[in-house]
Amino acid sequence: MKRKRPARARKMDANELREKAKRGRKKEGPVRLKKESFRTMVASKIVFVNQSWLGPRIAWTENARFSRSLSSKQTSMKMPSFSLGSHQARFVRDSNCALKKKVEVLPRDMELLNAWNDEYNGVVIASTSLPRCANAFASLLRASLSFWKSKGKKGIWLKLYEKQAELVPIAIQEGFKYHDAEAGYVMLTYWIPNDEPCLLPYGPSHQIGVAGFVINHNKHILVVKEKCSGTCSGVWKLPTGYINKSEELFSGAIREVKEETGIDTTFLELVAFRHVHRVAFEKSDLLFVCMLKPLSSEIKIDENEIQDAKWTTMDQLLSQQFYKEDKMSKTVIEICMAAYENTYTGFIAHQVTSKFDGKLSYLYYKDFNNN
């Protein structure tokens, strides 16, 4: 039995082909984006954002009309709301600034700089979490200042490190003022109330120095001759120097004597201190005179700091023309000798605890319990 050939398919004309194509598109439906990610077109740049991020919503501030017109024409491309964590938001801000300088990411829900409140109704900005992009920093700083003003805050503290130096002009432009600076950073402050005088403390105003009065059992005094030129040029005087950061007064005196002369000493008492103003760099100066007991006698000078050192008597020391003309320096030597001869009592360092910070510190006073 012969098989019947299947009927040959009839050729469709152009109209029938178009109708078939339309029916196919209706069945497939509109193309949908994946839920995991979406694309937002801004100023001809495409940024991928993970929808699972959490945090404040971020709105693009430039080319908003283009975005709205694009989303209205293509409903499948409508930009959904999304959230970013603090580190992701910072990444998007910094990346956006790198793509186009004019485009910034600004917070819709007022994202602020990381900071904490101090005990004087002020704010300390967290320096280590500042945005790397200057434009983003400027935007967040303005928003933060506006927020802190609304909350009645007063003093704002901003510490910027060397690697953040490009942010300093931005802060100055917003009204911050220089407070102090050290190697590696600059501290800026901002006083918010316009109707109140600024109550923030001034920057460091004093230098703190120490002098070591070292006298042995023969009543010989350890003196040095400085290398630098000036009023003390060629004068035999007590070893002096500035204390280091977080260094005790007596520790600084012991160290300076050791560095300049090689003599080991131990602290006995604080004999006197001098307070003078407008000295180096227009700062005030405090000099604390410490009586030290020598533990060695062989002098080994530091040629980088001093010209010479020796042991001398009080009469030889005061016979110099300098001490005849400088009453203060002469009085210091006389007080030190009186303390050595027990006709004058200086201040002893007593270690006590303060409730203000809960730490041990030294309080200098005369030992009145033995009187």
Image (cartoon, rainbow, N blue to C red):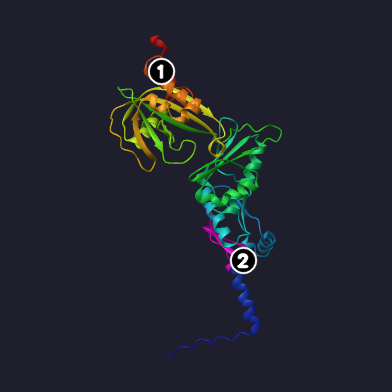
Q: Is residue 248 left or right of residue 199?
A: left
Return the residue nearer the eye: 19 or 55: 55
Residue beneath label 2, please? 44
Q: Residues within 10 Å of mark 2 (few under 14, many from 20)?
A: few
Name the side, left or right, on which 155 lies relative to 243.
Answer: right
Marks 1 and 2, how far apart at CA: 85 Å
Residue 114 position by quadrant? top right
Q: Is residue 106 above or below residue 199?
A: below
Residue range in magenta is 28-52
Secondary structure beneath dot 1 equals helix
Q: Amino acid at mark 1?
A: Ala
Q: Residue flagged by tag 2: what amino acid is it?
A: Ser
How many numbered marks appear? 2
Tell me if mark 1 has few (under 14), some (14-19) or many (20+) residues whose alpha carbon lies within 10 angstroms of its own. some
Residue wearing tag 1? 338
Q: Where does the image place residue 108, in percent across and percent down from the top left? A: 64, 49
Relative side of 308 to 152, left or right: left
Q: Quadrant of residue 343?
A: top left
Q: Is label 1 or label 2 in front? A: 1
Q: Which is more toward the observer, 113 or 253?
A: 253
Q: Earlier in the sequence, mark 1 or mark 2?
A: 2
